[in-house]
Image: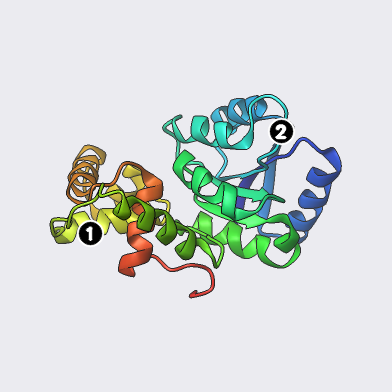
Amino acid sequence: MMVKALLVDDHAVVRAGLRALLEASGRVDIVGEASSGEEAVTKARKLEPDIVIMDLAMPGMDGIQATRRIAALGIETKVLVLTVHDEDEFLLPALDAGASGFLNKSAADTDLMGALEAVARGHSYLPRRAAALIARREARRRRAGRQAEPEPLSDRERTVIELTARGFSAAEAGREMCLSRKTVEGYISRAKSKLGLANRRDIVHFALESGLLRTEAEE
């Protein structure tokens, strides 16, 4: 499986190291590089890589903003966040922006290829603490009295929630289920309404708690 990737980091030395690591695997084609969030969005639109490997801390448009812009392009490119920042602060914003994976740079030499291929196959790649972080947020929400007992999902609503949590776009989920994109979007909208979910981060949380989605540790 050859994965087309766009490298985004404001440090040329870091990009060079990642390029060497990934190209040595023989399974990744680096189709471009970007040194800023603005450049990442422009090149993602032009090149439509399978995955953008996204740093977070960059001058100007940061990685969270760039991820949100790429997710809004309507292309099938997925974003894998690769950062030195701790997931406690940045995991949930990254998921909310549309990222499909989150990996600390300290683990890049051993885990990057696995994360890249997991995201390319349509899975979410999350750190071991993801479920605990999302559950903690949900507990705060429940204490605030913002969530009632959810209405049960239909089989198709459950399937689209699972696929969305794994990183599938509506178009990709539609092909998987032999449905139109518009029909899938309708199922997603109804499922979110039933469950009281606002965004993709909430969907990932529900999927983790209900067993539809597993973290890297469980894989």
Could you tell me which secondary element the residue under label 2 belongs to? loop
Check whether the beta carbons of the residues at disc 1 and disc 2 lie within 8 A of each other: no
Q: Is residue 75 left or right of residue 138?
A: right
Horizontal and vertical percent position of residue 28: 67, 54
Residues at marks 1 and 2, CA–CA distance in whole angstroms: 37 Å
Residue 165, picture quadrant: bottom left
Q: Position of residue 192 (x, y in %)?
A: 24, 46
Q: Quadrant of the N terminus?
A: bottom right
Mark 1, mark 2: which one is toward the viewer? 2
Dot 2: few (<14), some (14–19), or many (≥20) neighbours within 10 Å? Answer: some
Q: What's the colour scheme?
A: rainbow
Amino acid type of the residue that numbered disc 1 sits on in the rendered structure: Arg
Q: SS for tag 1? A: helix
Residue 20 in the figure: left or right of residue 41: right
- Nearest the eye: 140 or 96: 140
Q: What residue would you read off at disc 2? A: 58
The first of marks 1 and 2 along the sequence is 2
